Image: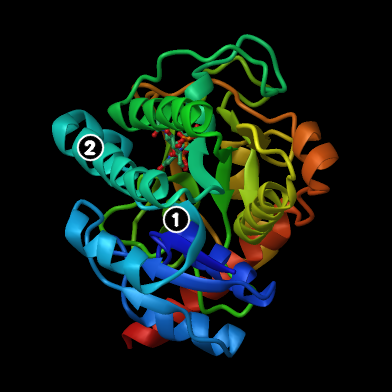
Amino acid sequence: MAILVTGGLGYIGSHTVVELLNNGFEVVIIDDLSNTERFILKNIEEITGKKPVFYPFDLRRKELLTQVFDAHQIDGCINFAASKAVGESQIIPVDYYENNLFSLINILQEFKTRKISNFIFSSSCTVYGQADVMPIDENTPLKTPESVYGKTKQMGEQILIDFAKAYHSKISLLRYFNPIGAHPSGKLGELPIGIPNNLVPYVMQTASGIREKLNIWGDDYPTEDGTAVRDYIYVVDLAKAHVAALKKLIDDPSSDAVIDIYNLGTGKGSSVLEVVKAFEKTNNVEVPYQICARREGDITIAYANPDKAGKELHWKSETSLEEALRTVWEWQKYLKTRNS
Ligand code: UD1
């Protein structure tokens, strides 16, 4: 079966392509290389010994997308391609709506015309905002996200639900908590393009001396140590959940709409200070930090109840925070040797 993976050279996309290839799927990648680099493709090939088809273009180019669907018998899509910088999305909102939603709609037009089912959407726990009750399960009420980025995720979900109902399609909305870590081969990970916004890439760069100090955004939260709590999920575990979600859609015999929604996390919350200390201990390095004011738009606490994914996908997170942080440091070493 051939699966279209948009954004397949990105952080979560590249790890998912590896899992798809290892599970016998053919993969067609479309990626405009706006937030990644070409060597990731070569590394995917080295890891898997297989060669995915790759098209470098922006999904808003409808005519090129049609050509890909003409050239390949596509059986499903995992859609990672999207702009994802929260701060930037507030500054250039129209570009975020255009990029994230037009690309989705263009793929869905092809799905509609060709009667293709099986669509997996990369969503985020940001759709819950600051939930009132922990852990967060799939019935937790959605709140309007603070950021434009988050709103594009919520709108994307809504578009897909309407699509599934109207065309009796099968969709899966995967709401990620905080993905971290790198491939055990040391050849795939989150590429640090610009100054990182997310915690773990910033910790990694501080430990290696690229950044002087980590700014911890607030230690006056109502949590045990005062720093905010998140659910950090290892990227390879997350990638495996995509394959499980895809197989479930493919195997579903129903001719009605299927709308699956899963929270993908470990089920365990870790504070910012816990992550910093675990990184230092696991990798035997120092991460200098200073406490700063809270970051605007941040929530206090979010961790998943992943039971539904456990039950229906037979999936659970298997990798510890420490092991995930070890792979981050291996990835940093790899990047260093590449750049030297
Ligand atoms: C952020 C996005 C979220 C997105 C997710 C993707 C915001 C407000 N939310 O989530 O929409 O889906 O990334 O991974 O940006 N922290 C520091 N110092 C840093 C960086 C982070 O103390 O330099 C803290 C943050 O305040 C937060 C925690 O670390 O408490 C995690 O931050 P981050 O990795 O940016 O993820 P989220 O804010 O949870």
Q: Is residue 40 visible?
A: no
Mark 2 residue element: helix
Q: Is residue 336 left or right of residue 92?
A: right
Q: Earlier along the polypeptide chain: callout 1 or callout 2?
A: 2
Q: Is residue 320 left or right of residue 206?
A: right
Q: Is residue 264 above or below residue 248?
A: above
Judging depth in this view, the residue of 111 and 204 nearest the camera is 111
Q: Single out the mark in the foreground, 1 or 2.
A: 2
The reply to whether discs 1 and 2 touch (Cβ–Cβ < 8 Å) is: no
Please state the horizontal and vertical placement of residue 79, each as a whole percent of the image.
Answer: 44, 51
What is the CA distance from the residue labelled 1 to the residue labelled 2? Answer: 23 Å
How many residues crowd around disc 1 within 10 Å: few (fewer than 14), some, or many (20 or more)? many
Judging depth in this view, the residue of 234 and 308 nearest the camera is 308
- Tag on residue 96? 2
How many residues crowd around disc 2 within 10 Å: few (fewer than 14), some, or many (20 or more)? many
Q: Quadrant of residue 136?
A: top right
| Point 22% across, 59% down: residue | 58
Q: Is residue 103 left or right of residue 47?
A: left
Q: Is residue 141 above or below residue 196?
A: above
Q: Amino acid at mark 1?
A: Pro
| Point 79% across, 49% down: residue | 315
Image quarter where ligand 1 lies? top left
Please state the horizontal and vertical placement of residue 270, each as a whole percent of the image.
Answer: 67, 37
Please state the horizontal and vertical placement of residue 47, each as a whole percent of the image.
Answer: 58, 84
| Point 49% across, 19% down: residue | 129
Mark 1 residue element: helix
- Tag on residue 218? none
Residue under label 1:
201
Quick one: quadrant of the N terminus? bottom right
Q: Amino acid at mark 2?
A: Tyr
| Point 19% across, 38% down: residue | 98
Judging depth in this view, the residue of 41 and 323 nearest the camera is 41
